[in-house]
């Protein structure tokens, strides 16, 4: 069952990649604009992470004040809105609506997977090793 899960995840990732490539080609032909670029990825991923962690910090009242989290959340929302406004300024309205909806939906799993990969990479490169005490009587 584990192998089937891995195959399903791989097929889903390939389907998302195929859709992104197809949509970028379509939007380049129709409106001379690409919705899935490195700049858009950085903007959406950072805004989604800021919204998520800002909300979490607001609930936990980080450092004794929920305003800290609210500021981070607001910055994430501002980045998201500015990126969507850029979409509408750069291409036709009907294409901008389609592309913005596709971005809002597809960048959520991309953000989650990217965060998991980042955590795994940090854990791997940290090379945590067990510590042995030579003078221990246990």
Image (cartoon, grey):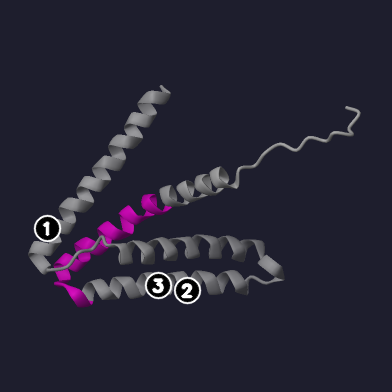
Q: CA distance from mark 1 to mark 2?
A: 31 Å
Image location of residue 49, percent across then percent down: 47, 61
What residue would you read off at disc 2? 75
- Label 2 to label 3: alpha-carbon separation: 6 Å
Q: Which residue is mark 3?
A: 79
Residue at x 36%, y 73% (from the top left corner): 81
> What percent of the width, then of the height, locates residue 132?
78, 35
Q: Are marks 1 and 3 in contact (CB under 8 Å)?
A: no
SS assignment at label 2? helix
Relative side of 53 to 101, left or right: right
Where is residue 137, by image quadrant?
Answer: top right
Marked residue nearer the N-terminal end (1 or 3): 1
SS for dot 3: helix
Whether pointer 2 and pointer 3 mark residues with C-beta atoms closer than 8 Å, the reply is yes
Q: Residues within 10 Å of mark 3 (few under 14, many from 20)?
A: some
Horizontal arrangement in the rendering, residue 50 relative to residue 31 (left or right): right
**In the image, residue 74 lies in the stretch drawn in magenta:** no
**The C terminus appears in which quarter of the rendering?**
top right
- Quadrant of residue 36 within the rendered picture: bottom left
- Answer with the quarter of the image where residue 41 lies: bottom left
Q: Tell whether 134 sits left or right of 116.
A: right
What span is in magenta?
Answer: 89-111
Toward the viewer: 42 or 85?
A: 42
Q: Earlier in the sequence, mark 1 or mark 2?
A: 1
Q: Residue at x 20, y 64 (%)?
A: 34
What residue is drawn where x is 54% and y is 65%?
54
Q: Main secondary structure of the magenta part?
A: helix
């Amino acid at each position: 069952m584990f192998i089937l899960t891995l195959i399903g995840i791989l097929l889903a990732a390939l389907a998302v990649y195929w859709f992104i490539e197809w949509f970028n080609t379509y939007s380049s032909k129709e409106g001379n604009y690409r919705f899935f670029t490195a700049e858009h990825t950085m903007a959406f991923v950072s805004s989604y992470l800021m919204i998520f962690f800002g909300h979490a910090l607001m609930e936990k009242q980080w450092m004794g004040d929920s305003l800290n989290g609210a500021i981070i959340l607001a910055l994430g929302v501002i980045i998201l809105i500015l990126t969507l406004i850029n979409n509408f300024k750069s291409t036709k309205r009907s294409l901008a609506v389609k592309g913005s909806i596709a971005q809002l939906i597809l960048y959520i799993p991309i953000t989650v997977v990217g965060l998991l990969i980042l955590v795994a990479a940090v854990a791997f490169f940290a090379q945590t090793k067990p510590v042995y005490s030579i003078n221990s009587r246990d």
